[in-house]
Image (tube, helix red, strand yellow):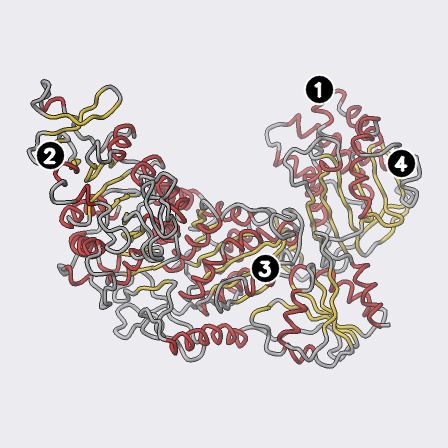
Amino acid sequence: MTAKSKVVALEHVVIRFSGDSGDGMQLTGNLFSDSTAFAGNDFATFPDYPAEIRPPQGTVAGVSGFQVHFGHKPVHTTGDLCDVLVAMNPASIKANMRWLRPGTIIIFDSDSVTEKALEKAGYDDDPTVDGTLADYQVVKAPISELTKEALKDFGMDNKSMLKSKNMFALGIVMYLFNRELDTVYAYFETKFKGKDQVIKANRTVLDAGYHYADTWELFTNTYRVEAADLDKGKYRNITGNTAAAWGLMAASEKSGRPLFLGSYPITPATDILAELTKYKNLNVKAYQAEDEIAGIMSSIGAAYTGCMAVTTTSGPGLSLKSEAMGLAVMTELPLVIIDVQRGGPSTGLPTKMEQSDLMQALYGRNGDAPLVVIAARSSAGCFYTAYEAARIAMEHMTPVIMLSDGSLGNGSEVFRIPKMADLPSITPPLAKADDPNYMPYRRDEKWLRREWAIPGTPGLRHRVGGLEKENGKGNLSTNPENHQIMTELREEKINRVANDIPLQEIYGDKNADLLVVSWGGTFGTVRTAVEGLMEEGKSIAHAHFDYIMPLPRNTEEVLQGHKKIVVCEINRGQFAKYLRMNFPEYKCEQFNKVMGLPFTIGELEAKFNDLLK
Amino acid sequence: MENQNIEQEVMLTKEDFASDQVVKWCPGCGDHAILKAVQDIFPKLGKKKEDIVVVSGIGCSSRFPYYMNTYGFHSIHGRAAAAATGVKLANPNLSVWMITGDGDCTAIGGNHFIHACRRNIDINLILFNNRIYGMTKGQFSPCTFRGTKTKTSPQGTYEDPFNPGELAIGAKATFFARGVDINPKELSEIFWESYKHDGIAVTEVLQNCMIFSNGVHENITGKDVRDDMQVKCVHGQPLIFGKNRDKGIRLNGNQLEVVTIGENGITEKDILVHDKTTEDTGIHMMLAHMMPPHFPVAIGVIRDVKAPTFNDSLDQVIENEKANSKIKCMDDLLNSGSTWTID
């Protein structure tokens, strides 16, 4: 190899691989992620593909992207503006203009520029020559032709050869970041085991891309991101939806209650159902029902029958499940409901993230029907949030809604693998067989929960249902005083969960001028923006809420002592309204965005600086 | 599967299955007789009391679980089949009985009903058909005959009803039977057949609502007409009926017809012999379809065919996967696949 260009060290980098739906960008991104893991960086990834299955080729609608954010320091987000864009056709440039910053390196397949391709992308002229990309470093490479050239002795047809052009692009990026190619070779060996010719062809193209970047001195500098200072341990890469599924399975194993999932496919939650259907070996009963209502109702039936029961959905599905959630509240059965939120109302933006189901989760049922609401803060964090949802549901005999969102669900992160022995215990209040004093609505004094009496257990036969029951005995009751008592008990039972959850943390000075409040999937961007301003010496602190109903018992203390409070969320201010309702004496300003996109760090910083003036 | 579990230490009686709750159905309601028939057959199932679960939806009939001293779950309108499916999948050893009405099952719960039939989940589904919404006080249901005047059809309905039998068989139910409320002994026998059947077992009970559809089944169950308007479906027996046992159902070409034995050269040999086990739904569908005035109503077990049950199939897949997977617990799974270590 020839002498490399100057190597510049960077703290963190965002790369977006972008091409037509058939260009293999998801694989390219994943392979780069693997090498990132090997390099010891902290990282997070996000796939950004079209809602349509086979959108028109070459159009902006057909662009498929995969973003990798990696760093030497902890990475909290999947990144917003990108440092490097790999664009396999003109449409990929058009689709990603929003994510470029001045100086972004655009690695572009110059062979993709044809009159037709420009027209499909909606360009009148070649954007790489007409000045459109003047603010960026455009690196043009004839990727298609060079891929064919590299494979000319393999006896492959044109179409087959071009399928490998993503490996040429990957080779260029691997060079740019001084990466070893071993992890990619290893992938080829496993993926194409026994097909030596295919392995060789892919290696050839990857190497060709790498050497091309080197020999032709495509870049003035190359870059290196040093290994992150991660805790010792074993790691894996995990998406939010997979992490949620595994968290549920872990809770099931820990509690000894078999896992039952009743669910119905809905974007972006379907992957949790798909993931759980894989683990019949671990006794998971994942049931794809005929509709959303059957999903939750079968889960309620399974909860009654002693399973750790779950239903998973997104906003429209949560609406459909409302009545059944009320039944779970009334029958006081453990049930986990995971809502992977998307843009609404109605069908809305199925593939885009939003946090606008909060009020629905809190109040979207008939009657006074309180339940526990908690939210996941990161993709890997979905494991622990799902585990915690299941723990609270079973130990407090209540439905629990876990809010996730499309970005968390589809995004992936580095996940430090826990040991089952280290996870908190889960002990549901099971009724004892043949207890002569058993009554369906007998409650313990501390938590006010009723016992779980499971069909098949001798001596505990009883009836429950949606009608109001007499406290204690559990017979049908329309007695006015009893309804008052039961309604208050159901409320107090949920309130007391506050005694079983951690206190709210405040990051930074507890008397900082500006308190930034957030919840759910915005954690990473908000925390990064707050950290940035802290480093500049600004008086700013951050409180990120994982527990929403009930709120942590020190919430008021957290809100005290600041000149300003700003609540940041991807909706029109639902958590801000909730805080104002609970703590009317504190003035909560809002920062909201509803574009189906996460916050960017830049816009948060601008807002915080404005408030600090 | 459930039949194998016959190890009753103490002989149970009907009283063992009556709860301490006051039965609040109207006096004379057909529901009382159905309750009696169920309480009558439960001690004979050979199932422990704690291994029976009664699940219901909403409506008069759905109060049923409260009157049974078993595990019981009174769910929400239309959703009993979905809840019962969850109960059965959670613990296939349980004998699951689902109680529903014509409104609960074929209107708001129609989707769950057809899919429970299609999947062949092993539950016993008893559909109380009084062709009216009783609990909400007299609105027409999907089983109300065209032209019936009700609270919400003051000029008479202008839509045609479902026939639950056709709906169930059309949705691939492996068992369909029909009984009448005034014959609890016959109902008990049907429920026994339902219990013995592996898979979904749908029994439609023609049930009289004294208040809102009184007499709706009178042309079938009335003392004067019942022998001529009901034909008992007994497996392997010719479909003969009538006060004088001289009428029969004959298959003429591709249609059923009522014939009189001894007239026009018709003998018993011409009468269709009932075969509840034939997989083809054709004749079962035609039998379920029969209605007065031109036909008697088919009573008894019309269809009872074998097919893999959903719950057994799921359990089989689970057993296979358990046997063939190297991953035995969560620690195995968490550490499987692509991982890396930082020292």
Mark 4–mark 3 CB contact (< 8 Å): no
On residue A128, which mark appears? 4
Instruction: Give the residue at x 49% y 74%.
Output: A491
Question: Which amino acid, by three-letter code, is at mark 2?
Answer: Gly
Q: Secondary structure at mark 1?
A: loop
Instruction: Give the residue at x 37% y 70%.
Output: A451
Question: Which amino acid, by three-letter code, is at mark 4?
Answer: Thr
Q: Residues within 10 Å of mark 2 (few under 14, many from 20)?
A: some
Left or right placement of residue A607 versus residue A409 in this view = right
Q: Which residue is mark 1?
A: A157
- Disc 1/disc 4 C-alpha distance (Å): 30 Å
Chain label for disc 2 = B
Q: Nearer the viewer, mark 2 or mark 1?
A: 2
Residue B28 position in % (x across, y down): 19, 57
* Residue A587, placed above or below residue A231: below
Chain label for disc 1 = A
Q: Nearer the viewer, mark 1 or mark 3?
A: 3
- Quarter of the image where one finds residue A538: bottom right
Q: Residues within 10 Å of mark 4 (few under 14, many from 20)?
A: many
Q: Which residue is mark 2?
A: B242
Chain label for disc 4 = A
Residue B176 position in % (x across, y down): 26, 39
- Quarter of the image where one finds residue A41: bottom right
Q: Which residue is mark 3?
A: A403
Quadrant containing the C terminus of chain A is: bottom right
